Amino acid sequence: DSHNPDHGNAPDDIKDADWWYTFRYGAFPFFVADVRTRRVKKPAADARRTMLGDRQLESLKQWLRENKEAPRLFVVMSVPLFPDTREDAPFDDPNDKWAGFNEERFEILDCIRENGIGNVTFVGGDVHNSHFAKLTCDEDSSFAVASLVSSAFFRYSYLKKKHFHVSYELPRPSGAR
């Protein structure tokens, strides 16, 4: 957070701080998401698992809709939206990443698809690997999003191509359209 814009909350109110923010670099809008402090893995009975929390998720979807005419939109997350790591990947728990929050992931992807938002690139890290991936939809040939991952350069990359799901179908949450 030391390099982030001032989030405007007093230090004693840190638990309620919004750690996500947006900015533009020329014609290119960026949404830098917080997928750590709002994450809920074990929700109460009347809630769901979440990476973003309700308010940040709605802010992201609104930002996507408002910026849909931009030549390219960048959504930065410390955890890649896709591809998922395989269950046998060393030192990795896929359920701690977006595979464990599939309902919310599809809410983001459906927002992009249903609103005809093109040129979205998700930028991520965390998997100690660098790669580029493209996600398409068999039911909507105009839908495509990209994932660009560049993790820390100083650590040995123990995850290889074989540790990621390649050319596979994201499992749609039950009851989803």
Image (cartoon, rainbow, N blue to C red):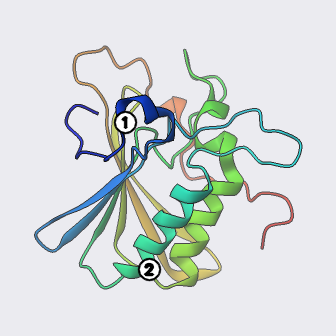
Q: What residue is at 58 percent from the left and 36 percent from the top?
A: 97
Assess disc 1: are there few (<14), some (14-19) or many (≥20) residues with their C-alpha within 10 Å of its C-alpha: some
Q: Nearer the viewer, residue 38 or 119?
A: 38
SS at mark 2 in the image: helix
Left or right: 54 as drawn, with respect to 159 = right
Q: Which residue is mark 2?
A: 65
Residue 169 appears in the picture as rendered: no
The amino acid type of the residue labelled 2 equals Arg
Left or right: 5 as drawn, with respect to 21 = left
The image quadrant that residue 75 belongs to is bottom left
Q: What residue is at 39 percent from the left and 60 percent from the top?
A: 146
Q: Does 73 sit above or below residue 48? A: below
Depth check, mark 1 against mark 2: the one in front is 2
Q: Which mark is residue 125?
A: 1
Where residue 169 sits in the image (x, y, percent)?
Answer: 65, 56
Which label's residue is closer to the chain start, 1 or 2? 2
Q: What residue is at 70 percent from the left and 34 percent from the top?
A: 41
Q: Does 42 sit above or below residue 7? A: above
The image quadrant that residue 25 belongs to is bottom left
SS at mark 1 in the image: loop
Residue 39 appears in the picture as rendered: yes
Assess disc 2: are there few (<14), some (14-19) or many (≥20) residues with their C-alpha within 10 Å of its C-alpha: some
